[in-house]
Image (cartoon, helix red, strand yellow):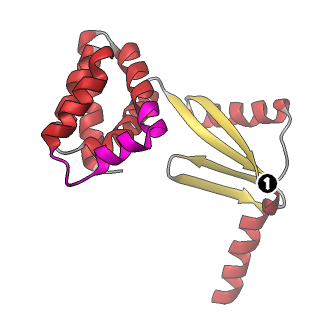
Amino acid sequence: MAVAHRIYAEALLEAAKEAGRVAPVREALADFVAAIERTPELRAALRNPQLDPKAKASILGELAGEYEPLLSNFLRVVAEKGRAAELEAIAHEFERLIAREERRLSVELTTARELSDEEAERIVRQIEQAAGRTVEATRKVDPDLVGGIVLRVGSLRVDASVRGRLERLRQELVRS
């Protein structure tokens, strides 16, 4: 994650908190980024280094006219500063900052087989107790794991799978 993404996301969050508008800004930003993701032409224009930042600011200003005023101003500033191509990354960082403040942790659970709801809930409760945070978990199945679990929290990956253990054992044997 680039430092600039964090700086812009923190600035937007602070402004939204001061205005008492965190929820509306969050929703509007998510909607706006979803629109960028659904519109390849818009994404291409925002990422085009030959397009003048003021032109990008104008495009974003027109598109954001119906959105939350705080977000509209933010989008114009981001574009004028030459960061329009980074809006999706800034939005991702904004969401991460809100989750941190809400003491929410997003976890991806990958297992070799589909977990029952009870098994998943038990694992989530254990993570919540260990982390001291509320956990939002998504589940994936990867039969190549053989058994065990792989947890991913942001860029942190904890591999407690049979495949991971076998790979660590293989590496240990190669070093010996």
Q: Is residue 76 left or right of residue 89?
A: left
Quadrant housing residue 21: top left
Amino acid at circle 1: Gly
Relative to 101, is 91 above or below? below
Q: Is residue 116 left or right of residue 52?
A: right
What residue span does the magenta drawing correspond to?
34-52
Percent coordinates x, y for residue 43 in the rendering: 37, 43
Q: Nearer the viewer, residue 83 or 119?
A: 83
Q: Do we see residue 109 in this rendering?
A: yes
Relative to 117, is 50 above or below? below
Q: Nearer the viewer, residue 42 or 150?
A: 42
Verify whether residue 50 appears in magenta: yes
The residue lying at 48 percent from left, 27 percent from top is 103
Percent coordinates x, y for residue 120 in the rendering: 77, 35
Please tell me how crowded label 1 is: few (under 14), some (14-19), or many (20+) other residues with Cα within 10 Å.
some
Q: Do we see residue 14 in this rendering?
A: no
Relative to 22, is 37 above or below? below
The residue lying at 70 percent from left, 33 percent from top is 124
The residue lying at 51 percent from left, 46 percent from top is 154
Q: Is residue 165 left or right of residue 33?
A: right
Verify whether residue 75 appears in magenta: no
Q: Which residue is identified by label 1?
A: 148
The residue lying at 46 percent from left, 29 percent from top is 99
